[in-house]
Amino acid sequence: DTEVTQTPKHLVMGMTNKKSLKCEQHMGHRAMYWYKQKAKKPPELMFVYSYEKLSINESVPSRFSPECPNSSLLNLHLHALQPEDSALYLCASSRGLGRVAYEQYFGPGTRLTVT
Amino acid sequence: AQKITQTQPGMFVQEKEAVTLDCTYDTSDQSYGLFWYKQPSSGEMIFLIYQGSYDEQNATEGRYSLNFQKARKSANLVISASQLGDSAMYFCAMREGVTSGSILTFGEGTQLTVNP
C-alpha cells in the first residue's frame, strides 16, 4: 500500500481564520514533507520531518506552522494567511532521508483558497 | 543554472504511439537519483520511475522506461503505447548526494496530451 491521504480535499478560508491540513501515511515511512504548488509550476518544498522532528524549514512564513504528532501523521496549521497563499498543498512521505534512492510518495493534495 | 531542465512545455502524441519527454540535469555529485512523476489534473503526484547514478541498466516500469545517458546528463522518459489516461503534467526530479538527500529538485514540467 503506497497511499498517502490528505484532508480536506478543498478548503476556502478568510484571512483571519485558523485552519489545519492533515496528512496520514501507514507505510512505516520515517520522513514526511509539505510542499506548496502553484498552478502550472513544480512543487516547492516547505518543511521536512524526520523521525517526528523538524529537519528542514525552507524559510516558510510563521503563518504556516507544521506539526508531527506521530510517525504516521503530519499537520499544517494555517493562521492569518494571505490571498497569495492560495495553492495546492501536497504532503509526501519516504522511507527516510539521506539516501538518494528513497522515492517520495505524494498525497492527492489540498486545494486552498484564501479570500 | 537550472539543476533540472525540461525543454518541452507541451507535447502531443497520438494514442498507441510512443513519446519521449526530455530531461537534462546538472550536478557535480557522483551519487544522485533521478525520478519521474506524473501529475494528472486531479493534482496527485504519482511516482513513475527511478534511476540511480550508479545503475548500469536503464530503468523500466511497465510502459515507462528511462533513457539514461550519464555522460550527456540526460534522463529522458519514454512512454510506449500511449493511452488517453497518460494525458498529464510530467515532472523530472533529482536528489543529490547524501547530505542533501531529502531535497527533490524538480524541473518545470512537460504537459503531455494524448490525442485519440
Image: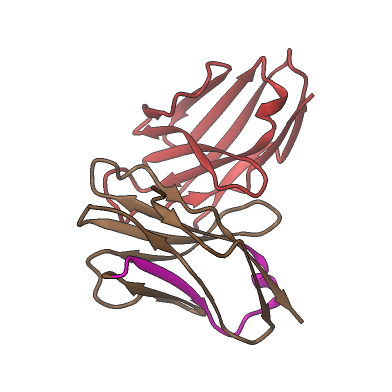
Q: Is residue B77 magenta?
A: yes
Q: Quick one: which residue is furthest to the front in this view?
A: B1
Front residue of this view, candidates A106 and A51: A106
Position of residue B61 relative to residue A98, above or below, is: below
Position of residue B45 relative to residue B115, above or below, is: above
Q: How many numbered marks appear?
A: 0
Q: Residue at x 31, y 43 (%)?
A: A97
Q: Relative to residue B1, is residue B87 drawn left or right? A: right
Task: Please identify the quadrant where the C terminus of chain A is shown.
Answer: top right
Front residue of this view, candidates B70 and A101: B70
Q: In the rendering, at what x and y percent does residue A48 appear?
A: 41, 34
Q: Is residue A112 magenta?
A: no
Front residue of this view, candidates B95 and A76: B95
Give the colour chain B carries in the figure. brown
Q: In the rendering, at what x and y percent does residue A104 appear?
A: 44, 51
| Quarter where residue B25 is shown | bottom left
Front residue of this view, candidates B105 and A106: B105
Q: Residue at x 23, y 52 (%)?
A: B28
| Quarter where residue A54 is shown | top left
Please give the range of residues in magenta.
B72-89
Q: How is the image coloured?
A: by chain
Q: In the rendering, at what x and y percent does residue A34 appear?
A: 51, 36
Q: Relative to residue A9, is residue A77 drawn left or right? A: left
Q: Residue at x 38, y 40 (%)?
A: A31
Give the colour chain A carries in the figure. red
Position of residue A39 relative to residue A65, above or below, is: below
Q: Relative to residue B36, is residue B68 drawn left or right? A: left
Q: In the rendering, at what x and y percent does residue A42 appear?
A: 55, 48
